[in-house]
Image (spheres, rainbow, N blue to C red):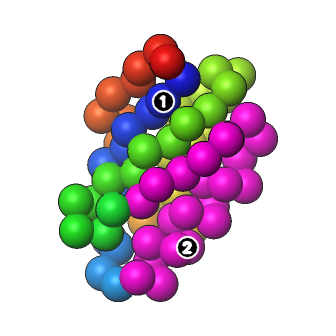
Amino acid sequence: MKAILQVTGMTCDHCAKRVTKALQGVAGVRSVTVSLEGGRAEVEHTGTISPEGLVQAVVQAGYQAKVLSLESA
């Protein structure tokens, strides 16, 4: 499964790394790719987590997020 999030508030590479680390800390996440320029995060996961859980992880890291799409792999 893959979720694509729009992430706002990232202004530098450190921000992108912080969002990456926050998402990697969610149980069930397999991989994370964050694009600073695109303001997006692609999250490969097991399907056992809720999209809201991913958004909450980003919010707790200090940024805003919303789910753009969910895909079955």
- The residue that disc 1 covers is 2
Start and end of the magenta stretch? 13-34
Judge whether residue 25 is colored magenta. Answer: yes
Residue nearer the viewer, 9 or 2: 2
Q: Is residue 18 above or below residue 12?
A: above
State how far apart marks 2 and 1 are (Cα): 20 Å
Residue at the farthest right position: 27
Of 47 and 8, the residue lying toward us: 47
Q: Which mark is residue 20?
A: none
Q: Which class describes the residues within 10 Å of circle 2: few (<14), some (14-19), or many (20+)? A: some
Residue 20: x, y in percent? 55, 63
Dot 1 falls on a residue whose secondary structure is strand
Q: Is residue 60 visible?
A: no
Q: Quadrant of the N terminus?
A: top right
> Callout 1: 10 Å neighbours few (<14), some, many (20+)?
some
* Numbered badge on residue 18: 2
Query: Disc 2 or 1, which lies upstream in sequence?
Result: 1
User: In the rendered view, would you say 30 is above or below 65?
Assistant: above
Q: Position of residue 11 (x, y in %)?
A: 30, 81
Which residue is the extreme one toward the left? Answer: 38
Residue visible at 47% across and 84% down?
14
